[in-house]
Amino acid sequence: MPQFPLHPAKICSLFVLLIVALVQTTQADDLQKTTLFEARDGQYHHYRIPGIIATSKGTLLAYCEARKTAGDWADIDILMRRSTDGGLTWAPPQVIHDAKEHTVNNVVAFNDAQTGQVHLLYCENYARCYYSFSNDDGQTFSPRVEITSVFEQFRKEYDWNVIATGPGHGIQLKNGRLLVPVWLSTGGKKHRPSCVSTIFSDDHGKTWQRGEIIVNQGDEFAGETIVNPSETVAVQLFNDKVLVNIRTESKPHRRLIAVSDNGATGWADIRFDPQLLEPVCMGSILRVPAGKSHPKNAIVFANPDNLEGSSKRRGPNRDRKNLTLQVSFDDCQSWADKRVLEPGISGYSDLAALPDGTIVCFYEDGGLKNNGYDTTGLTVARFPLKWIQED
């Protein structure tokens, strides 16, 4: 397979030489936080849309959008940092795709437990989708292959203008299927109205197929109208069904849930989860099998657990703050424990688990600027499952 090396990001030599010394790490009991990217660092204006996975070898790959300006349609590159010691130290940032004045968006990666490969998908200008893979634990990636044709499979049913993968991470089902949540919109740069679905591969990324549309703008369930479903995360439950957890702008202000036997068809049990608040922000979800550090199978969910900050001008949006971790021991039927990870301004996040059961959350933190959400950095937090339960 042809390979090409990852190009170092345009970072100062002092940062390269003192990489470990410059990361800001805080320790409190079992919680450790490290800042991986800081906004307005002289290279990029903003770092947003974090994603993180653990490879078959236990290497952590933390990736994000590096934006030249703040908006979703900015000149955006994809950056990645690697850790081979469980997130204690991190290699310098590497550019895995230079946008060359294009918008590169919604990076999704995931580990293939059957082949050891790392799969990577992303979109360009919200109109084309690309796939690449790594055979060396994320050190290099194959030349990208365009897979926009899988989205063209939706055309007759949904004549989209905008497409996006994830964001966050994809998943591999127990039968080997690679599964990526996606959303599509018939609107333009406002990304509305929208619908959500999945794409999948049963041959380790060689070919891709579309799933059924899960929910669409205007659908009604239990007397509630679905409004602009978009960024979706997926998890395979311990009963082997696939659950998706969906961002919407619907009036209940709760996360929307749907379940399928295979992650592609037959979506059912569509409902709003009464325990999971929806401030209109991406969330993240993770399957954590029982192990030495925790005796029960668990599902962990993270998002800003907040409904404060409403106003007529902001419509359905609420303040992105109070990033909270919640744990379910019954396949997301209920949420037994919760703990605040970041009480201040905080937004998008992604979750991964190390072989020893340590959970890693990679998330946006920041402040407010001109009464709006302003991401000032991307932070990674490490903690055991018991840390969530101890609050």
Image: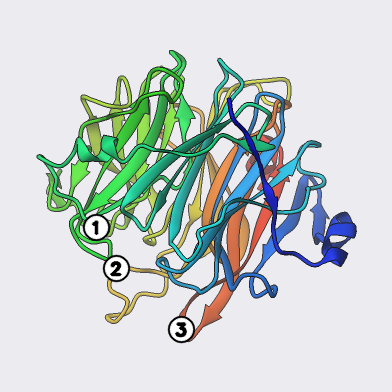
165 displayed left or right of 10: left
Residue that badge 3 annotates: 371
The mark nearer the N terminus, 2 or 3, is 2
The 10 Å Cα crowd at callout 1, few under 14, some 14 to 19, many 20 or more, is many
Point out the residue furthest to the front here: 2
Q: Is residue 42 above or below residue 240?
A: below
SS label for mark 2: loop
Residue at the (81%, 59%) spot, across then down: 23
| Alpha carbon separation for disc pair 1 and 3 | 23 Å
Sooner in the amino-acid sequence: mark 1 or mark 3 = 1
Vertical comparison of 145 with 251: above or below = above
Q: Which circle's residue, 2 or 1, is located before the other in the chain?
A: 1
| Residue 354 quadrant | top right
Q: Which residue is mark 2?
A: 316
**Left or right: where 137 falls relative to 20:** left
Measure the alpha-carbon separation of dots 2 and 3. 15 Å
Point 68% across, 51% down: residue: 7
What amino acid is found at the position of numbered circle 2 in the picture? Pro
Residue 18 in view here: no
Query: Which labelled disc corresponds to residue 279?
Result: none
Relative to residue 203, is residue 339 drawn left or right? right
